[in-house]
Amino acid sequence: MARPRQFDETEAVTSATGLFWRRGYHATSVRDLGDELKLTPSSLYRTFTDKHTLFLRALDHYRATESAEARQQLNAADRPVREALREWMLWLVGGPAGGEPGRGCFVVNTATELGTADEKVRRQTEAAFEGTRQALRSALAGGRDRGELPAGLDIDAAVELLFTTVLGLRVRERAGHDIERLTTAIDAAIRALGPAPAEPA
Amino acid sequence: MARPRQFDETEAVTSATGLFWRRGYHATSVRDLGDELKLTPSSLYRTFTDKHTLFLRALDHYRATESAEARQQLNAADRPVREALREWMLWLVGGPAGGEPGRGCFVVNTATELGTADEKVRRQTEAAFEGTRQALRSALAGGRDRGELPAGLDIDAAVELLFTTVLGLRVRERAGHDIERLTTAIDAAIRALGPAPAEPA
DNA sequence: CCAATTTGGTAGCGCTCGCTCCCATACGGT
DNA sequence: ACCGTATGGGAGCGAGCGCTACCAAATTGG
């Protein structure tokens, strides 16, 4: 019934995500959004209620695409944990086919820009963080069970360290730091997991 | 000659730093600043030129106070490196006498909010980052020379890992993460430096 | 005491902000 | 064909933005 839309809602959310990602919440105006998404104010507000709600949709979209892709890439489990972790972290800092540089992580940017003041945003960023930690935990547990990591490895501690390192890497990518130095940090983080256990007799 | 000021410039910069720190650049208006610093627009603009210049002053002030205090606390060198690193990192995440929680690090917040677009800001954040890395390098070198760390420790790599971890910790503090988990990450990072060498014969 | 000079206070500039209203337009259902 | 309904377009709302102009108040040097 009635006139159909001339735009794709998901496409619009994707564009909005890109803008918010690059510029942050406060520095992105609804006119900027309208231009980028090819939406008039009336369509934008009818579809997405307001700027804040659209931002939450963007965070949702980011979790459903970028974050999800990151999780499944880490947990692909077709190679040793250390390799998987290394390639995953290198991918996170925008090495290979990653999009434009200097964007960092949308979730990290949002968490630092808005802090804990906005409860709905906080829940979203927290859920994204928890997802990453779970993926790390799963990868490490798998690696330990496959005998690639020390049997006595404190997985909780390793998860916290790697997760914290990843956040730092995302900040540094946003800050434009050299990929070489980030690689050094990544390799050091992986080495921190301890030596590969000797083959059992 | 002429009428003296009724306000302390340094005090004003301190207040401005606090506001920018908590809210970020874009979310802080010059009226907010005027209220907080007890400055009328005319005094504010005559003294600090404009909002952007005041922001650079705030970054300067932060480096000269918070960052400097952090550096000297780490390099106090009246205790073993590991203890120093641990207490320093705990202090960074706002444990003991730190100010209000949830502020994170002004430099990290700025780097993620503004990225690399603003060249003057980028130079400031980069300088702050380099200062922290130098402090870490110095602390680690001292520890290794005192025999508290493995002689073969790759200091470059350790600096990159610890520095990245610190940035991650600052993000997590801003995001309101539990101090317990941050402590777990801190301890894991320090353990990554390797075992204490045995006493030479 | 007075001129010179810089301050603090206020009104308000032009502009952009997030957002709303109105309406012609374009489709679906019957 | 025609009515009901949701759409795209655009003007424009009140509010706040960063910033400036103007002026009385306050202090110093002569």
Image: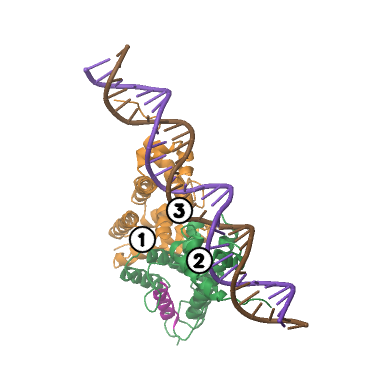
Chain colours: A green, B orange, C brown, D purple
Q: Which mark is residue B48?
A: none
Would residue B198 be seen by someone viewing this image from the given angle? no
Q: Is residue B1 left or right of residue B6?
A: left
Q: Which residue is mark 3?
A: B26
Discs 2/3, front: 2
Mark 2: few, some, or many residues within 10 Å (few <14, many ≥20)? some
Q: Which residue is mark 2?
A: A34
| Residue B69, horizontal then vertical, whole percent | 37, 46
| Residue B71, horizontal then vertical, whole percent | 35, 50
Q: Amino acid at mark 2?
A: Gly
Between B175 and B83, the residue placed more toward the observer is B175
Distance, label 2 to label 3, CA atoms, is: 20 Å
Q: What span is colored magenta in the figure?
A: A80-92
Q: Amino acid at mark 3?
A: His
Discs 1/2, front: 2
Q: Chain of mark 1?
A: B
Q: Which residue is mark 1?
A: B117
Residue C28, by quadrant, is bottom right
What is the number of callouts on the image?
3
Between A8 and B73, the residue placed more toward the observer is A8
N-term mark: 1 or 3? 3
Q: Is residue B182 above or below residue B91?
A: below
| Residue A171, horizontal then vertical, whole percent | 41, 63
The magenta stretch spans residue B156: no
Distance, label 1 to label 2, CA atoms, is: 22 Å
Q: Amino acid at mark 1?
A: Ala
Q: Residue at x 56, y 76 (%)?
A: A6
**Contact (CB < 8 A) between labels 1 and 3?**
no
